[in-house]
Amino acid sequence: MPQTPIFSSMLGSSCSGQVQPDMGDRCVDPVYQDGNLVSGSLEALIERLVPTMDYYPDRTYIFTFLLSSRVFIHPHELLAKVGQICIKQKQQLETGTEAEKLKSFAAKIIQLLKEWTETFPYDFQDEKSMKELKEIAHRITQCDEENGTVKKIISQMTQNLLMALSTRSQYQEIREKFRQPVTDKGTILKTKPQSTQKDILSVCCDPLILAQQLTYIELERVSNIYPEDLMQIVSHMDSLDNHKCRGDVTKTYNLEAYDNWFNCLSMLVATEICRVVKKKQRTRMVEFFIDVARECFNIGNFNSMMAIISGMNLSPVARLKKTWSKVKTAKFDVLEHHMDPSSNFCNYRTALQGAAQRSQTANSNREKIVIPVFNLFIKDIYFLHKIHTNRLPNGQINFKKFWEISRQIHDFLTWKQVECPFEKDKKIQSYLLTAPIYSEEALFIASFESEGPENHMEKDSWKTLRTTLLNRA
């Protein structure tokens, strides 16, 4: 992520992308509506990206264009085009007598490269991109060979880039191995005394503390999601624009790992509830998770909250009528109201907006936490992509679409940079991340053992599941 705080000024009250004065002989085909850039050819948009001696693009435009450009062109191809424009401008300035203008131009190009390498370091993962970057750097270094200032800045920029690439590469190498659901009959069928089974309550019985540890895990995982990862939702779609770009894009596991975390948490909640033998203890477990979900909501951790609710709404848990009859469900009803899917999750979106507004005026990291329901966030980007075309009928890029997508992604990037205010509890997190979880089949078996089947359909399912599991052993 960027080392400089560029996002604080990005995508504020408007994404105007207004043309700056003194654009010189630049392409004039971009289309504006009320001063807002809404479309343009790829060539014109690239021209607008590259600074001149008298012009530097707005940071909102730099971010939005670099984010969306991968849909239409490889990063190394874009770098090559930027390099060509730089060479042309450098040659024009060299014909004059003012050396200071050349240095000013060089400083602006370096700033652009610095923002690019800091915000999208993964664009430089392949040799072609690094070669183009070095070529541009070499040309710009020639603009100030006397004192070597430019050379030092470029050297530091390159070093920072290599560190960022190394860090991300290490994360992908050690990415979590997805937990496999338990299917062993000895683990699922309750052959052991309840006292020998470790559960979440034996590790943490305070809902607030567990919610805080869940938030710690969430923030740790979203910190490894990058804007280009999110843009894959668009760039991997089948279209005439990107068919040539998809083949060599390195697959990212960050989105999958985060989605897997949500599923694991849901299944862990269901497992913890279903494997409890005694109804009284099972009721306590349900109420505990309700309280945890409520604390997650208060913190602003909507993803964990949704995962917990999803776990309790799974059929093996929902069918435990005797248990639910003993549960004080008023708090659970409130939570389900917040996550009501009707009207496109209107209630949740209202709560999310409230958390976002709180975050903007907060004085502490505790109040800045906003962790959206990730699946809904992804669906929003996908929806924006599907209802708006990448190109307009005249062949120009529909930049209005990408302004909106970048605005959504910017919000997520802002939230993910919040430093977690809670101290890590290794014991609790170890349990959350490694405790056995049941498969859907195993959950039904445990559920039927907790509360027997109530109708012919459930009785038939129970017999089939038990026979299948025993034959498998």
Image (cartoon, rainbow, N blue to C red):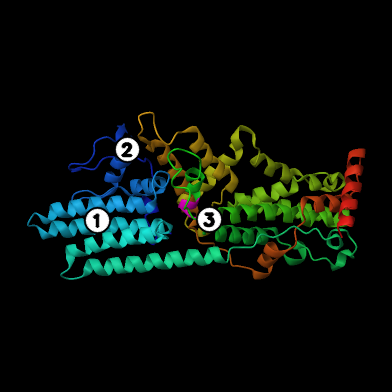
**N-term-proximal mark, 3 vs 1:** 1
- Magenta residues? 225-229
Q: Residues within 10 Å of mark 2 (few under 14, many from 20)?
A: many
| Residue 165 appears left or right of 85 | right
**Front disc: 1 or 2:** 2
* Rendering coords of residue 465 (x, y %): 87, 49
* Rendering coords of residue 444 (x, y %): 83, 49
**Figure disc tally:** 3
Residue wearing tag 2: 41
Q: Quadrant of residue 103?
A: bottom left
- Helix, strand or loop under label 1: helix
Figure quadrant of the N terminus: bottom left
Residue at left offset 20%, top offset 42%? 21
| Residue 371 appears left or right of 266 | left
**N-term-proximal mark, 3 vs 2:** 2
Q: Amino acid at mark 3?
A: Thr
Q: CA distance from mark 3 to mark 2?
A: 29 Å
| Residue at the left extreme, as displayed | 97
Residue wearing tag 1: 108
